[in-house]
Image (spheres, helix red, strand yellow):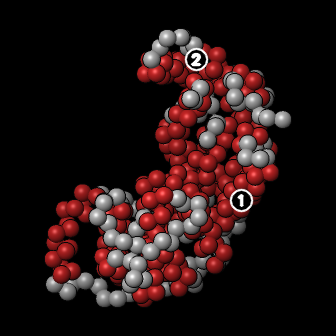
Amino acid sequence: MATATESTAAKHSLCGYSWGDLTSALLKNIAAGNMVRAQRWAAEFICSESGLGRLEAVLFHAWALYVGPQQAPGWPLAWLKSIQHIRSLWAKSGGDIRTVRNTPSVRQSAAEAVAWLVLTTKKPLPTLPKPEDCFRESEAMRIRLKNGGGAGDQASVKRVWVPNSDGHDLKTIGNEFEAALRGNQQNRMLFWIVWLCTLDSQKDCPSIKDRAPAEVTGKQRKSVLWFLGAVIDDLMREMRMCESPEIQAIFELLGITWMKLAPRGRRDVLASLSVGLQERSAKLLTYPPPPPRPQAGIQSAMADIDKIYAEIAAEAKRFIAEMPQITGLTAEAAAAAAEAARLALMKRTLPNSMDKLAIAYSAVPGFLPKN
């Protein structure tokens, strides 16, 4: 049976914020270019149990939403290397994430990734069609396709589609998607992405070859979005969207973060890559060299990172101290009481005097790192 502390940690960050609110705050501040607040919320992920894995996906999603459409290279490969480094530290620790997550190496890796996203010129993802739009147009679309009005076989789909494993509907949708991409029909291209994402949630979705990486388990291995990802991968290599290691890094990140991205994140990543591909196809230009890494801005962000962690330590201690410890409450009542304390805490001005997160760890059973 999970303890009260473990149950709270599963639903909230160290300082009591819900994961949804924390994710939204980080994404919004990256979009707005607010370095201090973006670093603050990223640090909250790092300090919280189960937060480091969530941060991997949130930052990749942020790249897709605000940077990916312009295909600015460099960041995915750098973030993948940081994740691999962090996971190697975790493996050396014997799988004890508490001894890894809040270390100088992890702090710096995450802070650099956040700073890079904050400082990069933004190009937001276009507004995507809604599933209702797909349902509204589905019948007319089926009639058009049945009468031979669909796109012919496309090059990438021919290379990716496997007759004995992939359903015929996937070939049709893939051809329509690729034709719209190559024809610079952005709304139509995004329509097919949303259609396929919607189809992925249906029980009667077509069969698909298993293309998922080892990190993905269960029924998600049979997601039809892996077919779309394979087509996009092939298109990126054909059009030389970026260097091969960068393309590989993007799809490795997709596999690593697949479960935590959830349906919306997966859709946004694939749509972002498609928009960048379409603009590349329309301009027919050689891909420009990657912009210089904003090293000066990153170094500036590093200067205040310890102060941010000190503020989190102070806030965490106050939140833990003021959380009601009332025996005999039902789970719902206990959750409501804890939320009331959280709201009361948020109204106060937080002190900046704490200098070690270990203070917060020492106040919570189960948070103290193992020797």
Which of 146 and 119 lies nearest the eye of the viewer? 146
Instruction: Looking at this view, name the residue that lies furthest to the right.
Output: 371
Q: Which mark is residue 323?
A: 2
Q: Judge whether residue 63 can be spotted in this image.
A: no
Q: Give the image location of residue 270, x and y in percent.
A: 46, 66
The residue type indicated by label 2 comes to Met
- Say which element carries label 1: helix
Residue type at tag 1: Gln
Provide residue 179's location: percent of width, then percent of height.
Answer: 35, 82
The residue at the point 36 percent across, 62 percent down is: 200
* Quadrant location, the C terminus: top right
Q: Is residue 88 left or right of residue 191?
A: right
Name the mark on residue 354: none
Q: Residues within 10 Å of mark 2 (few under 14, many from 20)?
A: some
Residue occupying the point 33% across, 70% down: 206
Q: Residue at x 62, y 48 (%)?
A: 53
Front residue of this view, candidates 79 and 205: 205
Q: Nearer the viewer, residue 26 or 231?
A: 231
Disc 1 marks which residue? 84
Q: Quadrant of the N terminus?
A: top right
Estimate the spatial distance between the alpha carbons at disc 2 and disc 1, rounded to whole Å: 36 Å
Left or right: 108 as drawn, with respect to 273: right
Quadrant for residue 75, please give it: bottom right
Q: Residue at x 44, y 65 (%)?
A: 222
Would you place residue 57 above or below residue 51 in this image?
below
Q: Residues within 10 Å of mark 1 (few under 14, many from 20)?
A: few
Above or below: residue 223 compared with residue 148: above
- Which one is earlier in the sequence, the residue at label 2 or at label 1? 1
Counting from the top left corner in percent of width and height, residue 308 is at 70, 35
